[in-house]
């Protein structure tokens, strides 16, 4: 077969595989159901990165097996291949395309990051102080003057500012359903903003949990607290009940 | 037998004496200072002298001490199996010492992974107990890191690099022996840590946890610092060797790509390792002397450690993987019987990776609470690394395209590397992007990603190297069919196991956990079962290696008809490497170029013709 024919066949298989891959990447949900505004932004970044990965991935996945099948043999080759040491146009294109992709991703990433950092940073914030200790979390709602260790309860639709710290070793505050995570570091207060936009409970979806995500010793794996996101009304009732039972 | 192992026995005796002296000294000092003696300062001081005692006993005294003090130097020519248990300066022997040591450690740490997967087969299960799981996981991590850092540089570069550049040995043969013989104390410390309560803080040992936990942590810290010493000495030696000992005509533009890759990795080893030593030493000081680098209550800063640690440990992944790139491209070009595509661009790519590797460390800290404004710059430089890394793929694909591919076991492993590292590289972008990293940080997505780069990448490269150089190292041929079965078994087992780890990571399973939410039970059961199947592939590997080394058919000098210098001498090579020193006259990879020759025999006995 001529060089051009090989090239055409590979290009066709690559285009077909890429098309199928892009459709799959856009349609198959591989992340848990998102439950915060930030989670939606992160999930669309995930989809975009996956879609952009497909043509890169398929290039190798098509070229390597094709070359093995067409140019490969199990015995010793009798002759050498063509002495091609490089190809100026392909090299320039390769560097150009990879650099352009990187620049695009960097720009996209910067915009998206700014979005999730600032979206919930306005007024009207609910402040929750989260304190990690081996091996439990304690949540303080300073405005409501309540404190809880058994559960994290949040109203839906209201931006929350978590002020996170630790008393002993480094922990990490992570709610998989919100996609947001920040380390709890002794001697520091770190912050993360989340806007829950779906009600839910740990009982129905195990991604509604605070999970310690930084290795902290013995019971690290089980340093979890159920998360409940409820309507503002119910939340007010919960707060009132907490205050009453204090 | 006892006589043959005399240097080892002497080393152990001297080490024990050093340990006792150091311990007593530390006890005396603490009493003078009015502090009741406690175990960790005694141990740290004892270890310091034990290490010196071990090195003196095992060979430093015989090779350096006697000469320095003008005492008669004993020259004991040992050329049988005993040389592998001695302070030998032959780079080929040291290469084999490294290779065998680290493959044994690799298999050991692999067994620890099997234990971990047993624990994780079902939620709530406690075969190990959470503390034991954390200890096993941490030990698996650090041993595998050592394997990843040292196997290619210590093993293959030692064996093959002087041969590839036409040298008699490395620049500093005794330093080379020293860099190997500090490794056994590392292994002993790591295993002995289990008797001191182990260490449960992972291979990263973040304080304050690593200041507060069991005394096994101290042994980990001392082991890691000692290992760093070996790494620095190795880096220094290879840089000097490549700069100074290239055969006449072996210009920088004719260096085999594997040599370039070791040169680049050595640059990082020599210049970055000190930073992790600093990080670890400050934790030692917090533990042993009660200093407060990381005690927030006394003004310490836990984040400081993370910066220092990753300032080495991110470049370190390139100490691991650039040699993997070099090895794989080396194998691919020989078995495609084509020149290496875009050779000069690949070298430029390696050097760019070295440079960039020093300014990306903070992408490990995107969720650590470091200042927000640092996130975007570190994201951008991290993503930039994919441009030079992409050149490795360009070269690999361009080389196999239209080649005459000889699909032997080393070639299969090299092509497997290309596929695996592709997935490792692409998923790296998801971790470089701050948004997606906020969710993926510290989950199984990260576990899967670095196993794709280190196991799917580097370990596959190591396997390619083992099969490629097996005939040269042992003088015997491995069993080709078994080698190919090993490849396919390992390739499929590895990919299914690790792809499934991405899945549980996406589903919100965090890493370094002895237990997980019940809904993830099915996926974890699946991962465990496939992981056990994967573990089985190494039985074939070990059988093939041992059996072929003992009973395999004699290998020809150049079974692959490769052009590089190591294949132009007998298998195994003679002690002096080149009976006639070579003179390099052409490029190593000019397959198919009419009339092209890589090297001719130079003046016999001479050190070159000066040209």
Image: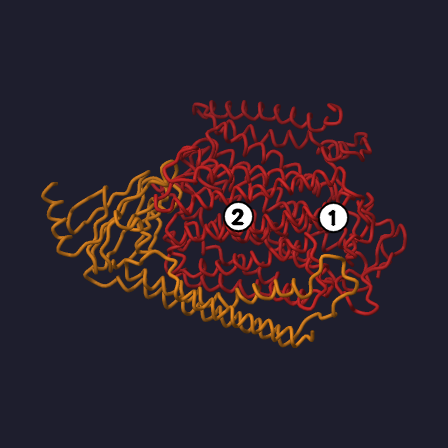
Quarter of the rendering occupied by the C terminus of chain B: bottom right
Q: Secondary structure at mark 2?
A: helix
Per the image, the residue denoted by label 1 is B171
Residue B90: x %, y % from top left: 76, 41
Of B343 and B34, the residue lying toward us? B343
Say if A176 sits above or below B338 in the image: above
Residue B488: x %, y % from top left: 61, 51
Residue B113: x %, y % from top left: 51, 40
Q: Secondary structure at mark 1?
A: loop
Say whether residue A135 is left or right of residue B474. Answer: left
Residue B267 in sight here: yes
Residue A228: x %, y % from top left: 22, 50
Of A174 and B591, the residue lying toward us? B591
Say if B202 sits above or below B49 in the image: below
* Count of labels in the image: 2
Residue B78 falls in image quadrant: top right
Colour seen for chain A: orange
Per the image, the residue denoted by label 2 is B275
Which of the chains bears the disc numbered 1? B
Quarter of the rendering occupied by the N terminus of chain B: top right
């Amino acid at each position: 077969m001529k060089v051009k024919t090989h090239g055409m066949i590979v290009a066709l298989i690559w285009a077909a595989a890429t098309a199928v891959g892009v459709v799959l990447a856009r349609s198959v949900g591989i992340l848990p159901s998102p439950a915060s505004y930030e989670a939606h932004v992160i999930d669309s970044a995930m989809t975009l990165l996956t879609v952009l990965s497909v043509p890169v991935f398929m290039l190798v996945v098509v070229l390597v097996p094709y070359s093995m099948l067409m140019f490969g043999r199990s015995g010793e080759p009798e002759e050498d291949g063509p002495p091609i040491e490089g190809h100026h146009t392909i090299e320039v294109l390769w560097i150009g395309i990879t650099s352009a992709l990187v620049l695009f991703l960097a720009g996209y990433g910067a915009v998206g990051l700014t979005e999730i950092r600032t979206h919930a940073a306005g007024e009207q914030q609910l402040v929750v102080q989260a304190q990690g200790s081996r091996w439990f979390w304690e949540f303080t709602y300073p405005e409501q003057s309540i404190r809880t260790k058994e559960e994290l309860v949040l109203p839906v639709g209201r931006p929350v500012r978590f002020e996170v710290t630790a008393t002993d070793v480094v922990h990490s505050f992570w709610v998989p359903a919100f996609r947001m995570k920040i380390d709890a570091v002794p001697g520091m207060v770190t912050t993360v903003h989340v806007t829950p936009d779906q009600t839910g409970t740990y009982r129905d979806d195990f991604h509604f949990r605070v999970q310690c995500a930084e290795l902290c010793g013995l019971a690290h794996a089980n340093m979890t607290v159920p998360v409940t996101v409820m309507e503002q009304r119910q939340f007010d009732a919960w707060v009132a009940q907490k205050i009453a039972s204090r | 037998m006892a006589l043959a192992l005399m240097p080892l026995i002497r080393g152990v005796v001297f080490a024990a004496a050093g340990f006792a002296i150091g311990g007593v000294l530390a006890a005396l000092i603490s009493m003078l200072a009015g502090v009741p003696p406690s175990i960790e300062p005694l141990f740290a001081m004892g270890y310091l002298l034990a290490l010196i005692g071990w090195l003196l006993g095992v060979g430093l005294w015989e090779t350096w001490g006697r000469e320095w003090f003008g005492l008669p130097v004993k020259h004991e020519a040992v050329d049988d199996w005993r040389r592998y248990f001695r302070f030998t300066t032959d780079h080929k022997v040291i290469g084999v010492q490294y290779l065998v040591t680290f493959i044994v450690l690799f298999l050991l740490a692999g067994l620890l992974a099997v234990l971990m997967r047993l624990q994780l087969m079902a939620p709530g299960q406690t075969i190990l107990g959470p503390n034991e799981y954390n200890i096993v996981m941490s030990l698996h991590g650090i041993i595998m890191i050592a394997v990843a850092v040292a196997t290619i540089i210590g093993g293959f570069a030692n064996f093959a690099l002087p041969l590839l550049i036409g040298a008699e040995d490395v620049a500093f043969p005794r330093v080379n022996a020293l860099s190997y013989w500090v490794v056994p104390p590392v292994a002993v410390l790591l295993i002995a840590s289990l008797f001191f309560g182990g260490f449960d803080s992972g291979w990263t040992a973040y304080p304050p946890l690593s200041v507060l936990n069991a005394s096994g942590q101290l042994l980990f810290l001392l082991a890691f610092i000692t290992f760093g010493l070996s790494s620095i000495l190795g880096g220094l030696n290879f840089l000097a060797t490549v700069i100074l000992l290239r055969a006449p005509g072996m210009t920088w533009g004719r260096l085999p790509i594997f040599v370039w890759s070791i040169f680049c990795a050595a640059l990082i080893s020599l210049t970055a390792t000190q930073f992790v030593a600093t990080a670890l030493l400050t934790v030692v000081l917090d533990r042993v002397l009660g200093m407060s680098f990381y005690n927030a209550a006394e003004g310490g800063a836990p984040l400081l450690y993370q910066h220092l640690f990753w300032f080495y440990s991110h470049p370190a992944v390139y100490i691991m993987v650039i040699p993997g790139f070099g090895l794989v491209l080396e194998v691919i070009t020989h078995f495609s019987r084509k020149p290496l595509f875009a050779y000069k661009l690949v070298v430029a790519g390696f050097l760019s990776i070295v440079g960039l590797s020093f300014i990306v460390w903070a992408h490990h800290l995107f969720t650590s609470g470091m200042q927000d404004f640092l996130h975007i710059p570190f994201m951008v430089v991290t993503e930039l690394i994919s441009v030079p890394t992409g050149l490795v793929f360009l070269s690999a694909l361009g080389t196999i395209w239209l080649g005459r591919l000889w699909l032997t076991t080393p070639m299969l492993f090299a092509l497997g590397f290309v596929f695996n590292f592709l997935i490792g590289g692409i998923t790296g972008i998801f971790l470089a992007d701050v948004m997606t990293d906020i969710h993926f940080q510290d989950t199984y997505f990260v576990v899967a990603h670095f196993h794709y780069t280190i196991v799917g990448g580097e370990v596959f490269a190591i396997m390619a190297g083992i099969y490629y150089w097996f005939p040269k190292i042992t003088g015997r041929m491995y069993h080709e069919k078994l080698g190919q079965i090993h490849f396919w078994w390992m390739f499929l087992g590895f990919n299914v196991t690790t792809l499934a780890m991405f899945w549980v990571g996406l589903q919100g399973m965090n890493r370094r956990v002895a237990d997980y939410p019940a809904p993830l039970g099915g996926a974890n059961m699946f991962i465990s079962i496939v992981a056990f199947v994967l573990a089985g592939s190494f039985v074939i590997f070990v059988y093939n290696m041992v059996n072929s080394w003992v009973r395999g058919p004699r290998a020809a000098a150049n079974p692959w008809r490769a052009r590089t210098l190591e294949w132009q001498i007998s298998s195994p090579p003679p002690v002096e490497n080149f009976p006639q020193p070579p003179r390099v006259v052409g490029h190593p990879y000019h397959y198919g170029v009419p009339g092209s020759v890589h090297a001719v025999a130079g003046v016999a006995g001479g050190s070159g013709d000066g040209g």
